[in-house]
Image: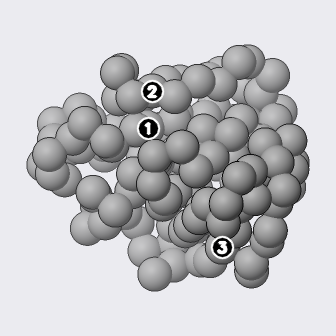
Amino acid sequence: MTIITNNEVETIAEGEKLGKTLNPGMVVALFGGLGVGKTAFTKGLALGIGIDDIVSSPTFTIANEYRGKIPLIHFDMYRLESENDLFDIGWDDYLERGGICVIEWSEKILGALPPDSIYVRIENLGGNVRNIEIASGV
């Protein structure tokens, strides 16, 4: 599925739509360059699963956790060197907890993603316009 958004509010709304379809234990892998809207999309996902907390980028903490009926664990792999670093922070444990894992900079850890992950690619088409592609699996 391909979606065009014209501003951050629309990007958040599309994340919210996807969030409403997610079940515990699912992984959403986000792809796209710096500043394309990965965190904005994640804000929408959080709203979609019923989390009202302020969602912020976990660039310096690697992971932010948000509590809700279904917990959301928001990862940022930008600072990781390899998949091994992901396993060092307890990736397997996070997957087993039954929350929804959302991962920014997923291209750095492709081999660690479960095969049933949802892939979201966000591209800046200029200004505030974004192309968002959502697909299941690879």
Position of residue 80 measured from the top left corner of the image (x, y, whole percent): 21, 41
**Amino acid found under the numbered disc labelled 3:** Glu
Q: Distance between the residues labelled 1 and 3?
A: 20 Å
**Amino acid found under the numbered disc labelled 1:** Phe
Q: Which residue is drawn at 43% across and 38% down?
A: 75
Q: Residue at x 81, y 35 (%)?
A: 47
The residue that mark 1 highlights is 75
Does the image show residue 4?
A: yes
The residue that mark 3 highlights is 133
Q: In which quadrant of the rendered view does residue 134 lie?
A: bottom right
Which tag, 2 or 1, sits closer to the chain's start? 2
The residue that mark 2 highlights is 58
**Of 64 and 9, the residue lying toward us:** 9
Q: Which image quadrant: the N terminus?
A: bottom right
**Of 137 and 38, the residue lying toward us:** 38
Does the image show residue 100?
A: no
Left or right: 102 with respect to 46? left
**Of 113 and 129, the residue lying toward us:** 129
